[in-house]
Amino acid sequence: MTDQPSHSPVVLRHMEKRAADVQLRIADAITSFAGSMKFVYIHAVLFTVWMLLIESNPWPTLTLVVSLEAIFLSTFVMIGQNRQAAFQQSKADHDFVEQEQELKTNTDITRAVHELAKQIHASVVAGRE
């Protein structure tokens, strides 16, 4: 028996939505890879090999490649931030609704307890007379 982490309905809906959209899955995969140490190591090796072995004057081309890569990576970072903000908003909306429902339930229970206390009090007072 494996213990599966339990996710809230908001998280599950968010995961299903992301899994259903090919563009979002691609963006997630790129963002995940670009945010890893594997990405850093691969770039360090590739740029070192390029500068030392492939081109005698790598700086103009290397500058262009690194600039273009930075443009695309910053776009993926912004996509990730937008995704996270949308998820946080959805989670906040869900939590608000849940809290409002809990407040209503607690208020109803408090009123019922108060009513029962009044009835018990009336019964006790009536029993003394």
Image: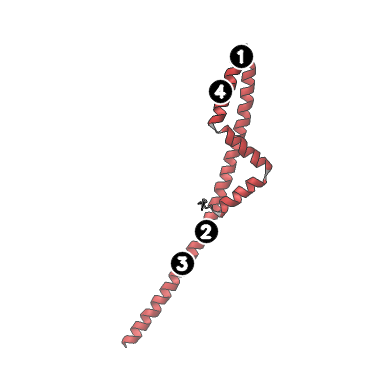
Q: Position of residue 46 (x, y in %)?
A: 60, 22
What secondary structure is marked by label 2?
Answer: helix
- Report, in whole angstroms, how far the alpha carbon at label 2 lies from the one at label 4: 48 Å
What secondary structure is marked by label 1?
Answer: helix
Q: Amino acid at mark 2?
A: Glu
* The C terminus - image quarter: bottom left
Q: For the residues carrying marks 1 and 2, which lies nearer the camera in this image?
A: 1
Q: At 62% across and 37% down in the image, what residue appears?
A: 29
Which residue corresponds to mark 1? 53
Q: Nearer the viewer, residue 106 or 16?
A: 16
Which residue corresponds to mark 3? 107
Of mark 2 and mark 4, the one earlier in the sequence is 4
What secondary structure is marked by label 3?
Answer: helix
Q: At 61% across and 17% down in the image, what residue appears?
A: 50
How packed mark 2 is, by other alpha carbons closer than 10 Å (few <14, some 14-19, many 20 or more), is few
Q: At 55% across and 26% down in the image, what residue appears?
A: 41
Which residue corresponds to mark 2? 98
Which residue corresponds to mark 4? 44
